Image (cartoon, coloured by chain):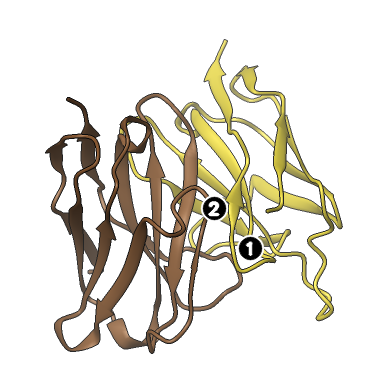
Chain colours: A yellow, B brown
Amino acid sequence: DIVMTQSPLSLPVTPGEPASISCRSNQSLLHSNGNNYLGWYLQKPGQSPQILIYLGSSRASGVPDRFSGSGSGTDFTLQISSVEAEDVGVYYCMQALQTTWTFGPGTKVELK
Amino acid sequence: EVQMVESGGGLVQPGESRRLSCVASGITFSNYWIHWVRQAPGKGLVWLSRMSPDGKDTSYAGSVRGRFILSRDNAKNTAYLQMSGLRVDDTAVYYCVSALDSSGYFDDWGQGTLVAVSS
């Protein structure tokens, strides 16, 4: 199985400031079709997860444009241009390249 | 409004079996892949299994392969996760998730059902 890692695992943020989370895989997630099969999910406290980014850099419908995804192959980044209080929670990356999918360990984002 | 509603959780003893159900509404169920994801208390998300819209393609995480079986009844808009040989470390909230394709885009999540394995 593909192993996903994230850093940092904990990220204190200040509202209005940018934030960045890194995700790495031990195998390339770049498909022969040119897409990176990497998604980002946010699980807010007490809620089910929700999608933010799919195929590495495509923002899901309804997701604020302060969220952006980048990267290719084995290295990916989720960026929040200006953190808002409602962005707290645990962020997970997930690979969907293989028939068995795997999540990263999660990055807990909380307000300073 | 799309709803994915899981049921069947509860307290089970180690070694026992349990079947979880997931009823979907608000979607054309037969068009969607169904996945199961679990989350142990205070821990991260773990992908478990997926089944294709026609039920012919199924895959499992290594941790549950051979013990868990995913099935579906498109006529009833329902998916099932049959769990056997349950272990203490299977204790988790189990989520049913729909996906229109295999891109990694999870469309809708249920609220989850808690399975607690303990003697």
Q: Residue B10: percent from the left, percent from the top?
A: 13, 40
Q: Residue B17: percent from the left, percent from the top?
A: 20, 51
Left or right of residue B58, residue B22 in this image: left
Q: Which mark is residue B62?
A: 2
Q: How many marks?
A: 2
Q: Residue A83: percent from the left, percent from the top?
A: 60, 30
- On screen, A108 above or below B1? above
Dot 1 falls on a residue whose secondary structure is: loop
Left or right of residue B84, residue A61 in this image: right
Quarter occupied by the C terminus of chain B: top left
Q: Residues within 10 Å of mark 2 (few under 14, many from 20)?
A: few
Measure the C-alpha gap from mark 2 to mark 1.
Answer: 15 Å
Q: Which residue has dot 1 on it?
A: A96
Residue at the image position 78 percent from the left and 61 percent from the top: A29
- Pick the residue in front: A5 or A91: A5
Q: Amino acid at mark 2?
A: Gly
* Chain holding disc 1: A
| Residue A23 visible, this angle | yes
Left or right of residue B88, residue A25 in this image: right
Residue at the image position 14 percent from the left and 82 percent from the top: B76
| Residue A79 visible, this angle | no
Judged by depth in the image, the label closer to the viewer, 2 or 1, is: 2
Dot 2 falls on a residue whose secondary structure is: loop
Residue B14, located in which quarter of the rendered image? top left
* Chain holding disc 2: B
Q: Which mark is residue A23?
A: none
